[in-house]
Image: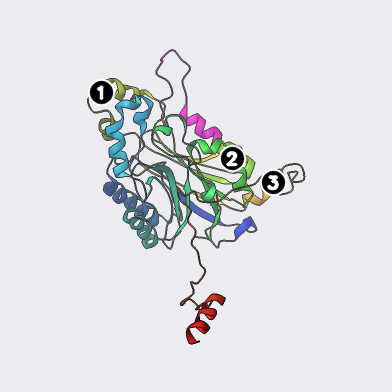
Amino acid sequence: MNSHVLNGRSATSVKVAAANVASVMFDPEAGVAKACKFIAEAGSRGVELLVFPESFIPGFPIWNAFLRPIDGHALFRRFAASSLEVDGPAIAAIAASAAKHGVAVSLGFSEVANYSAGCLWNSTVLINRDGNIVNHHRKLVPTFYEKLTWNRGDGAGLKVVDMGFGKVGGLICGENGNPLARYVLMAQGEQIHCANYPTVWPFRDDPAAPPYDLREAIRIRAAAHCFEAKVYTIVSAGVLDDATVTGICGEDGQSADLLRRSSRPASMIVTPAGTSLAESRDDEEGLVVADLDMSHLTELKQHHDMAGYYNRLDVFSVSLNQTRQAPLLTTQDTRRPRETAEPTTSEDDLIVGRSAQA
């Protein structure tokens, strides 16, 4: 590991990795074990930042693409029961593994609220190399059929965190096509961008219709953000394995066939010029690793610096609400009660008293 100097003011080298891996569907304990396994491998290879796919634990709720809503209840119950609380033991175990191996981690997971067993978010946590959660993001808007599973998030996690080796931000899947979400990360000095994607994305079931190329869609979005923000992007996408297909589809061969022929994603690491440094192979689990030369960030900003000189902040303005949403806001009366009531005496009491004495 070379010396780290922030803001790209001198040459630094940061080794990063994207986990191109399959989830263990509906099994959070096995998912945690698998995450820790790849964190250990990343640490042994000198990786400083490892990114996992979207909803890596407990998997991606892809049945919403092909089941009628009234047919998905059993799968939703299993998914909700397998989802994680952000301050629960599963996240704590992954954070402990990150600290043990000295690897920062961006983890995609399905989050369940601690106040409602049916309220879920599509979330990520950013864990530093000391095992501390330094950011917690909930996807702003669930995409298309994701709305059948996940709630809308908020702006509390739209933050860029100084990790020592660089300033790290991130967005989940379709958020990487949201210009405003990307801009607020640029404006906070983002240098390394984490992008989490699912295992598969069925878009239509018509062989005669134009195909939806998920890999190319990811490449376009990653390259666009890299080129505009002058950042590196680590894309982590899931692998669709047979166990996932069976776990979701069971004996439904038609749905299984739809999943298997749907467009697959790719994990990749993209440069500030929009070119690929490294990329995964189809359905092959493993780490996609690359070294990032942070000195390139400064040189390219001579051309375009969207959060700096290459903008008109007197013409445009962007505001960001980073308030964490909550179902209940309470207030309390903080005034101290009078410990004893002062006796009161009325004029009539005095008159009666005088009359009695008379």
Q: How many numbered marks appear?
A: 3
Extent of the magenta region = 201-221
The residue under label 1 is 252
Task: Give the amino acid at mark 1.
Answer: Asp
Q: Which mark is residue 200?
A: none
Residue 174 relative to residue 250: left or right: right
For marks 2 and 3 on the same chain, the one whose residue lies earlier in the sequence: 2
Q: Is residue 305 left or right of residue 102?
A: right
Looking at this view, name the residue that lies furthest to the right.
314
Q: Residue at label 3?
A: 305
Does the magenta portion include 316? no
For label 2, the residue is 225
**Residue at the extreme left of the image, as rendered:** 251
Q: Position of residue 278 (x, y in %)?
A: 48, 41
Residue 339, above or below 117: below
Question: For the stretch drawn in magenta, what is the main secondary structure?
Answer: loop
Label 1 and label 2: CA atoms lie apart by 39 Å
